[in-house]
Image: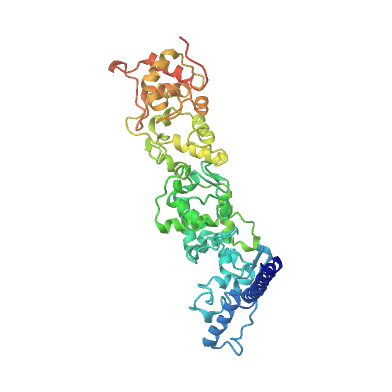
Amino acid sequence: MTSKTEHTVPVRRSVDEEVARRDLVMRVGIVVVGAMTIVVMLLTAGREHVYTEWRMHQVEHEKLMRSVEAGDAGPGATDLDVHIRQIVVPELGATDRCTSCHAGIEDPRMSGQPQPHSSHPGKYLVQHESARYGCTICHRGQGRALVFAEVKADDVHWPYALLPAGMTQSSCGLCHGAEEVREHGGEKYAAGKTLFEERSCVACHQLDGRGGSLGPALDREGAKHPQEVSMKYVSGPHTLPQWLVEHFENPARIVPDSKMNPPEMTGEQIEALTIFMLSLQDRDLPSEYLTPGKYLELHEARGVSKMDGPELFSTYCGVCHDTGTYGRWDDDYGKFIPAVRGPTFVQIATQNHITAAVLQGRPGTEMAPWAGGMTGEEVDRLVEYILSTPLPEGATLAPEVVSRAHQDDLLIEGDANKGEVLFSMQCAACHGQQGGGLLGPALANGVFQENVTDGFMFATIAYGHKDTAMPAFYAPEAGGYDIEDINALVAFVRLLGTGLEAQP
């Protein structure tokens, strides 16, 4: 019979052997992991301090320099001291290390070499020496970075990504007037500024304190960080230039609640307008960096406007109203745009009526207030132009009709209860049952109610507005309304928006 002790000794020995084996494996593992860590650290240190991107570019650059004919550059011209190069411009708040990789940027012998070894294209550096301007003032990007991916900064937390090569002209507008550079390297920027003016963008957006308020002010549009705009629907790189490009292609896709109509521009036009937008940075640059042409441009933008009535109307009003002489249907807004220079309107509207409409707008509609967007002098010139619209043949109203429409103290008395019935039958389909506006203007609007006379409303209902969807209702001999009916309608319209009801 085997004793208990004889069984225990072999078992204990096998356990000790297993522990020893595992201990050996652990020790070997620690040594291997430690060795791998040292290797990784050495590789990382080599990459960070020996085989860095900028250092390898400089080594390659020196080889290229030695392969290029030195010409009259003199002895030692191809020797390159490999080190981090840095340009500091305190006036611009710039610290740029771009020349650590672009070492040949000012060397004309490197023209035609591959990037980053090539000299700077064009003649930009002749008058914009890098020591005074640096690089990021024109190209943006992260100037302190030494790795191109971080310099480009289109997927890292850096305010301004490197501008696409074709959009660096946007920086011309920081210091130069558009006409100064139109034929001197800033062609796209100047074209974008012209397009901005021709497309009457200030009809909806303010710039330098001038313009409409339907859209956001644009003074620092080009200085926005990517985090300030929604990139949710941007299909390309999440950068401000890309956001602007895709926004101009289809505003409602990038900003779902946008009221901006598709501008229908070519790719070149979109690029030019984007470049101009990027130039709007509202930067407080030192005065010595601004050219006389830029000072003149700023003075003209912020001084007294020289635009006459037709120019003011075309710039500020024409986007929606076109010539203003006819009413038109707008598919994007789903409404009729009134004829603010229509022959009936300009005869029966008073100066106060039109001025109030311009300054206060029409709350609740796309007609935003222009108070502050135009100077008082500009508003006066605009109103004068509207009221001086030539009348087509046969459109002149009788003097007594015009006189009644201009009487501020004229109070028309009518049966508002009867007017409510007539309004429901003939007017509500366009103006809304409570006058809130549908296809036609909102009659319950406070600005409208406060500034139109009873005579204006009578004339509008009776004689309509020529070349608009508003017909003439005064035709008692042909089954239309008589004077009593129209008086009733005026009385009811006066109740709209007041909370009062017609009394039986």
> Which residue does the image show at 58% across and 74% down from the upper left?
53
The picture places residue 7, in percent across and down from the top left corner, at 67, 67
Q: Residue furthest right?
A: 5
* Residue at 51% in and 37% down: 368
Query: In the drawing, does residue 480 fall left or right of residue 263?
Result: left
Where is 432 relative to 94, above or below?
above
Q: Nearer the viewer, residue 186 or 254?
A: 254
Quarter of the picture holding the C terminus: top left
Q: Nearer the viewer, residue 471 or 29?
A: 29
The quarter in which the N terminus is drawn is bottom right
Residue 425, image x, y percentages: 36, 19
Position of residue 118 relative to residue 400, above or below, is below
Q: Is residue 433 left or right of residue 64?
A: left
Q: Is residue 436 above or below residue 53?
A: above
Q: Is residue 55 visible?
A: yes
User: Quick one: which residue is furthest to the front in this view?
Assistant: 1
Measured as percent of width and height from the top left, residue 375 is found at 56, 41
Q: Position of residue 436 (x, y in %)?
A: 46, 27
Color style of the picture: rainbow
As drawn, the residue found furthest toward the top would be: 504
The total of numbered circles placed on residues is 0
Residue that sits furthest to the bottom in the current view: 75
Q: Relative to the observer, which residue lies in front, 388 or 284?
A: 284
Please indicate, yes or no, whether residue 312 appears anywhere in the rendered image.
Answer: no
Between residue 255 and residue 281, name the one nearer to us: 255
* Vertical arrangement, residue 260 with respect to residue 143, above or below: above
Residue at (39% x, 17% y) in the render: 486
